[in-house]
Image (cartoon, rainbow, N blue to C red):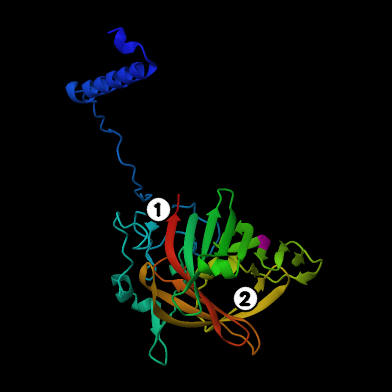
Amino acid sequence: MTSLLRTPARRIALAVALSVLILFLLLWLLHITLPRFDSQLPLLTAKPETVPMQPYKPAPRQHKAAPRHKPVKSKLVPPPPAPAILTSKAAAPDTPAIPAPAETPPAAETSAQNTVVAASGAETDNRDKTDIPHLPRHAQLSFTAYLGTSSTHIGEMRHNLEILEDGHYVLRTELRTAGLARLFKSYDLIQTSRGTLTENGDLKPEKFSGERIDEHGKRDVSSSFDWSRHEADFANGTKDPLPNHAQDILSFLYQLSQESFNRKLVPLTISNGKKLEHYQLEVGNVENINTPMGKLRALHLRKMRQPGEEGQEIWLGLEYRMLPVKFRQIDRSGKIVAEIVIREIRLSDK
């Protein structure tokens, strides 16, 4: 054995042989089984849940006229059923979405005293003031913006309404381009309206502010309403006489739900943050409009415009407290540049 290890080459060869032998024993002679550990953690999944809504019961108003925000059994505009979240069919594939009202709901069939047939035979809205729905205490409306009348998605809009316990309200809207459209044109718009809710259920704005950010930079506008002096003050230093029932460019969209629409033209005085403008809204017909929520019945309103002026069209949802469910923007040449269509409605009266 000693003679075998006399030379370095022999010692190296012996070491290699021993290493191979040990490796062979470990791989083939010893059977070692490692324990298997199966994970007991549950698979994480997102599951949308609805939020139940309880009917809001405000205190009776102290005035001679019939309270306009007191819940009534309106045949034209029934209160939304619980749960309160009215979702798009595509928004929650794992949870059954609340279906949109049928094209001709039972409430509409029995509301002959609330509708009239115009000379053309088209249905128009002629609600009595006692049928006007009260504004929800909390509302969140989500919209999708499309290019013109096409299906090209160019942006998202969200409205939030909060009516506080002290009688004040806060309205906020956010609009921004999205998807491929944002690569070509970045546009963000934030508007806020603050004010009070009157005894008659009307919005009475006190402060409006708007912020727009695009390729030209950031621009701000604002206006305040001094009802004691009947004066509107603007951030640029100008002032305008403030008529009764004036609104701002955001609050008027929700104040429309408190109109009776018993006339063909509705006059409005609206602040856009830079000046007061005088609108004439033409009251159109009740139409069926297609939305991601399904087909909705809506009252069509159109801003009367002179040649060279921008235009606007608004649709108010008859089944959803006359809240806005569609907008259409028209440029100075009369071309439809964008449509903004409701995607989801969340309401609560608690």
Which of the 4 image quarters holds residue 225?
bottom right
Region rendered in magenta: 206-211
Q: Residue at x 21, y 21 (%)?
A: 25
Query: How many other residues sit within 10 Å of disc 2, few (<14), some (14-19) or many (≥20)?
Result: some
- Circles 2 and 1 in contact, beta carbons < 8 Å: no
Q: Nearer the viewer, residue 214 or 50?
A: 214
Report the label total: 2
Kindly tell me whether residue 255 is visible in this rendering.
no
Q: Residue at x 43, y 61 (%)?
A: 345
Q: Residue at x 54, y 66 (%)?
A: 254
Disc 2 marks a residue whose amino acid type is Leu
> In the rendering, at what x and y percent does residue 297 appear?
38, 74
Q: Secondary structure at mark 2?
A: strand
- Residue furthest to the top: 2
Instruction: Provide the major secondary structure of the magenta segment.
Output: strand
Kindly tell me whether residue 334 is visible in this rendering.
yes
> In the rendering, at what x and y percent does residue 147 appear?
51, 76
Residue assigned mark 2? 268
Mark 2–mark 1 distance (CA, rounded to whole Å): 31 Å
